[in-house]
Image: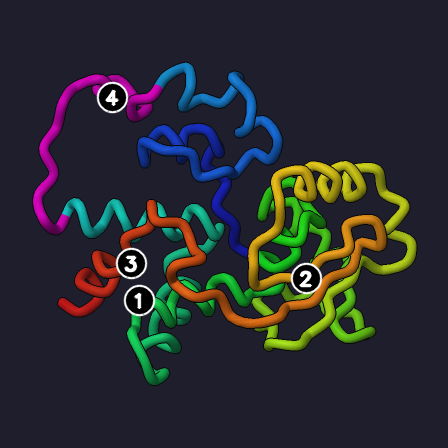
Amino acid sequence: MARNLDAKCRQCRREGEKLFLKGEKCFTDKCAIERRNYPPGQHGQKNTRLSGYGVQLREKQKVRRIYGLLERQFRKIYHDAEQKKGITGENLLQLLESRLDTVAYRMGFGSSRTEARQIVRHNGILVNGRRVNIPSFVCRPGDVIEVAGKAKQQLRIKGAAEAAEGRGFPEWLEVDAKALKGKFKARPQRTELPSTINESLVVELYSK
């Protein structure tokens, strides 16, 4: 399985904002953005002006990195969003947030999307009582997601759930952090998602 092995903190610095790829470290002053908020590399501190295409490309790369997807995977999801009724940009974000690895992360079953994806791949997640080990599995409203029996004993999962409960869960999820179980109530509305993402730039890029 292909993966993006670039250093997580370098990815955040390249995009100039926190992408929350390193779990709890991102919430501390050890975060790379807090210490060196400029792009990595020899010429990182030089001021460069991006073209219109460059701005669109950077936004697309940022969204890909947030959700941990390769270009081919991301393009497929965009194509699916384009085929659905409604606004393509909103459809794209809803599909990304409906992926099982992202839902598991939002419910606090992993401290980062990478960790949540690993838990899914290692048969640690149940959907409606059945094991699902496909991170790209699309959850539907009403689906019940739960950490599997033995995995509930893992301290990293308990710690991640406690930290997520302290920060609060999204409105479209219903989570019992102690039971490590939750319900995917509905697909999120655009107003409930981060305002730092400008999905219209991604649509403009792929529409060329």
Task: Inspect the magenta stretch and tell me whether residue 39 lies in it.
Answer: yes
Residue located 46% across and 37% down the image: 6
Question: How many numbered circles does the render carry?
Answer: 4
Whichever of labels 1 and 3 marks the residue nearer the N terminus, that label is 1
- Which quadrant does the N terminus fall into? bottom right
Mark 1: amino acid: Gly
* Magenta: main secondary structure: loop
Mark 2 to mark 1 CA distance (whole Å): 25 Å
Place of residue 45 in the rendered image (x, y in percent of width and height, measured from the top left): 22, 17
Whichever of labels 3 and 4 marks the residue nearer the N terminus, that label is 4
Q: Nearer the viewer, mark 2 or mark 4?
A: 2
- Identify the residue under disc 2: 174
- Image marks 1 and 3: residues in contact by CB distance under 8 Å: yes
Place of residue 77 in the rendered image (x, y in percent of width and height, measured from the top left): 41, 70
- Identify the residue under disc 4: 44
Q: Nearer the viewer, mark 3 or mark 4?
A: 3
Crowd around label 4: few <14 · some 14–19 · many ≥20 (10 Å): few
Place of residue 146 in the rendered image (x, y in percent of width and height, measured from the top left): 78, 62
Place of residue 203 in the rendered image (x, y in percent of width and height, measured from the top left): 23, 65
Q: From the viewer's side, name the closer residue of 148 and 134.
A: 148
Mark 2: amino acid: Glu
Crowd around label 3: few <14 · some 14–19 · many ≥20 (10 Å): many
Whichever of labels 2 and 4 marks the residue nearer the N terminus, that label is 4
- Identify the residue under disc 1: 89
Q: Taking the image as drawn, is residue 117 in sight?
A: no
Mark 3 to mark 4 CA distance (whole Å): 26 Å
Residue located 42% across and 34% down the image: 18
Looking at the image, residue 22 lies above or below residue 179: above
Whichever of labels 2 and 1 marks the residue nearer the N terminus, that label is 1
Q: Nearer the viewer, mark 2 or mark 1?
A: 2
Q: Which residues are magenta?
A: 37-53
- Identify the residue under disc 3: 199
